[in-house]
Amino acid sequence: MKRNISIVLVRPRDPNNIGAAARAMANFGLSDLRVVEPYEPSWRAAVSAVGAADIMQKARLFDTLPQALADCTVTVATTALKNRRLNETIVALPDFVEWIDKQPAGKMAIVFGNEKTGLANEDIELCHAAMHIPTTAKQPSINLAQAVILTCYELARNQVPPHGKSALKAATFVQTEIVVEELDKLMQAADFRQDYTAAQRKTLIRKFFQRGSLSKDDLFFLKKFATKLNGKLKK
């Protein structure tokens, strides 16, 4: 049995890539496809993908990546790493399953970017880690459909276990973001790190959480603490 894994496509434009990604999921036993801001004509053309009609019909569309990640406890961005300086943990595809097995239990999302530009830095910053597929230096990037196929194959070949290392109920993306918002308000109320933009402060807070695999109860405690301090600072 495989771990509960969702494949997320962000702003895809080529119906052939969308269809091939869905077929790869069907081939290797994955079924939860989530798509963020697809190019509408391409999406309509891809819905009838041969051999993956069931997955395409059940696929869920989202306006933003945070919405697509809301119920996930572990999120992974895929990137070619070219011309990027990332703060996230970087995992190569051959080591990916071993890395997954060390993560908290719960739903995992693997996020793939647009065919032309890949994922934006802001998209990658929302994720716990970045996964890349090793290629030659001469050709560092790989086609979207091929990337999904290789990833699905690697997951199936290694039979990713359904649970992670932790018996605690891990916090979802949306639960973590609630605490990020509350702590950012606290930083503003305390006039702390006002040289950062709100987005920069939230990224900083988010990275602390992503390094530690906090449970749902841990986050609830931090939220109550931040809310209490916010109330006192406003008096």
Image (tube, rainbow, N blue to C red):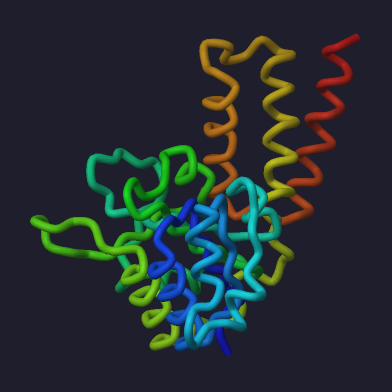
Front-lying residue, 72 or 35: 35
Instruction: Kindly identify the residue that appears in the image at 18 percent across and 56 percent down.
Output: 140
**Quadrant in the rendering for residue 35:** bottom right
Across and down, in percent, residue 83 comes to 23, 40
Count how many numbered circles sit on residues in the image. 0
Across and down, in percent, residue 64 comes to 61, 46
Q: Residue furthest right?
A: 235
Rendered-image quadrant of the N terminus: bottom right
Across and down, in percent, residue 125 comes to 48, 42
Front-lying residue, 40 or 228: 40
Front-lying residue, 169 or 82: 82
Instruction: Kindly identify the residue that appears in the image at 57 percent across and 53 percent down.
Output: 36
Front-lying residue, 212 or 69: 69
Across and down, in percent, residue 132 comes to 31, 60
Instruction: Kindly identify the residue that appears in the image at 52 percent across and 11 percent down.
Output: 195
Instruction: Kindly identify the residue that appears in the image at 35 percent across and 63 percent down.
Output: 144
Rendered-image quadrant of the C terminus: top right
**Quadrant in the rendering for residue 56:** bottom right
Q: Is residue 191 above or below residue 138?
A: above
Q: Is residue 205 above or below residue 189?
A: below
Q: Residue furthest left?
A: 138
